[in-house]
Image (tube, rainbow, N blue to C red):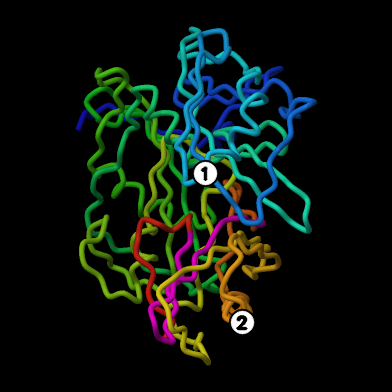
């Protein structure tokens, strides 16, 4: 590692940067385009009615001035739904894509959802950044970087470390620390900055550990380049310290999600730096009263409040009748450690969970924001 490391304790609040006067967002030097107009469905478009949710993965191929050169999508069993919206999609206007201030052609991934509720047809276009509501879609931002020949920097390995908690906080108030590291084209640290800490003692303890971690540099069009990486370290009360190396290799199932998420590295930070983590799923307190005699799954879009409770849910498939009611009852028994923003505030969160059945009373719970680690069974 190079010996020259600059440290500053200045708070760094502009993490994912909206461009002033524009509806774009800047990530790792990319000005990721977004729609110029809020209402993209044009007059005369007749969106097809669907009795059940349908999704399509899209890719807009944009010229350097933000115009659509072409549009591709992954077709499901029936592409008549997306065809009903194609005229509007093909005539959208986007802000100018750029890298390091220079306009460039850009591949913009997106997701189109057809949702019908109470016999009213609705369609939602998800993009990496949506100006209305200031919404960042992490998975689509990551796809956008990859599609445009950018490989983000990585935190490859962190050695074992020891951190003694001076006092035991409540589970929902677990300490966490955020650092920003500047990396050169070799992956060596050139600068570091404390973004946030809600426990300075632990922030100081983890700092030398992260300084001696292994990093790999970013790449753009096959060339290794300097970049920055945001590292979040979480101190869950359910994990004993000292810890083993990160990422973990084999751990007891009861600790798996917490261990995988105790350290997190991203090329950018949006408003949510700590997603909701299950707090009662691993204590096996949720018990199904009925056997589900099939192999299938139900998906729900849910909203989690600042207390970690599910307050809203929307079933994303129309099936299973009585068992749907039973599974929804179990869904509302789930409890989470609430989501946090980069200032440490508890915030509400929206995501998708799957309830998967396997011819027994067991229901596997999976969340789309915790896909890195397998979820255990509810017995």
Quarter occupied by the C terminus = bottom left
Q: Secondary structure at mark 1?
A: loop
Which residue is denoted by mark 2 in the rendering?
Answer: 322
Q: Residue furthest bottom?
A: 289
Q: Position of residue 160 (x, y in %)?
A: 23, 59
Q: Is residue 223 above or below residue 270?
A: above
Q: Is residue 355 above or below residue 189?
A: below
- The quadrant holding residue 320 is bottom right
Q: Quadrant of residue 91?
A: top right
Query: Where does the image place residue 254, in percent across and percent down from the top left?
Result: 35, 76
Q: CA distance from mark 2 to mark 1?
A: 28 Å
Does residue 23 appear left or right of residue 173 in this picture?
Answer: right
Q: Do tag 2 and tag 1 residues touch (Cβ < 8 Å)? A: no
Label 2: few (<14), some (14–19) or many (≥20) C-alpha neighbours in 10 Å: few
Q: Residue at x 55, y 32 (%)?
A: 16
Left or right: 134 as drawn, with respect to 196:
right
In magenta stretch: residue 348: yes
Queried whether the magenta region covers residue 298, the answer comes back as: no
Mark seen at residue 78: 1
Instruction: First in sequence, mark 2 or 1: give its number.
Output: 1
Q: Residue at x 46, y 12 (%)?
A: 105
Helix, strand or loop status at disc 2: helix
Q: Main secondary structure of the magenta part?
A: strand
Residue 93: where, in percent of width, then height?
65, 17
**Range covered by the magenta-colored residues:** 347-367
Using the image as rendered, state which of residue 235 and residue 330 is in the foreground.
330
Query: Observer-nearest residue: 260 or 321?
Result: 321
Say which residue appears at 45% left-offset and 65% top-offset: 366
């Amino acid at each position: 590692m190079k010996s020259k490391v600059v440290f500053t304790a200045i708070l760094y609040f502009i993490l994912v940067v909206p461009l002033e006067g524009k509806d774009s967002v800047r990530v790792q030097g990319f000005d990721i385009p977004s729609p110029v107009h809020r209402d993209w469905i044009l007059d005369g478009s007749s969106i097809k009615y669907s009795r059940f949710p349908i999704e399509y993965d899209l890719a807009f191929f944009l010229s350097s001035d933000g115009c659509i050169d072409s549009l591709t999508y992954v077709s499901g069993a029936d592409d008549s739904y997306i065809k009903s919206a194609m005229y509007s999609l093909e005539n959208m206007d986007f802000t100018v894509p750029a890298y390091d201030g220079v306009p460039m052609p850009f591949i913009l991934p997106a997701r189109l959802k057809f949702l019908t509720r109470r016999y009213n047809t609705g369609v939602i276009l998800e993009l990496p950044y949506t100006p209305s509501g200031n919404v960042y879609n992490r998975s689509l931002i990551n796809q956008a970087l990859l599609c445009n020949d950018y490989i983000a920097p990585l935190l490859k390995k962190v050695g074992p470390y020891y951190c003694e908690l001076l006092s035991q906080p409540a589970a929902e108030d677990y300490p966490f620390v955020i650092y920003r590291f500047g990396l050169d084209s070799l992956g060596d640290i050139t600068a570091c900055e404390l973004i946030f800490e809600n426990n300075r003692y632990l922030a100081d303890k983890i700092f030398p550990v992260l300084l001696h971690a292994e990093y790999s540099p970013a790449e753009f069009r096959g060339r290794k380049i300097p970049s920055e990486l945001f590292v979040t370290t979480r101190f869950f009360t359910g994990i004993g310290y000292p810890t083993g190396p990160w990422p973990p290799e084999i751990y007891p199932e009861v600790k798996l999600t917490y261990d995988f998420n105790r350290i997190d590295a991203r090329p950018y930070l949006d408003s949510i730096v700590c997603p909701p983590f299950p707090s009662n799923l691993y204590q096996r307190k949720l018990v199904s009263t009925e056997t589900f005699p099939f192999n299938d799954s139900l998906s729900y879009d849910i909203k989690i409040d600042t207390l970690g409770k599910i307050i809203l849910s929307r079933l994303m498939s129309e099936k299973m009748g009585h068992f749907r009611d039973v599974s929804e009852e179990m869904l509302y028994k789930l409890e989470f450690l609430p989501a946090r923003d980069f200032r440490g505030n508890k915030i509400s969160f929206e995501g998708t969970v799957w309830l998967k059945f396997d011819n027994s009373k067991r229901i596997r719970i999976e969340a789309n924001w915790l896909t890195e680690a397998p979820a255990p069974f509810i017995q």
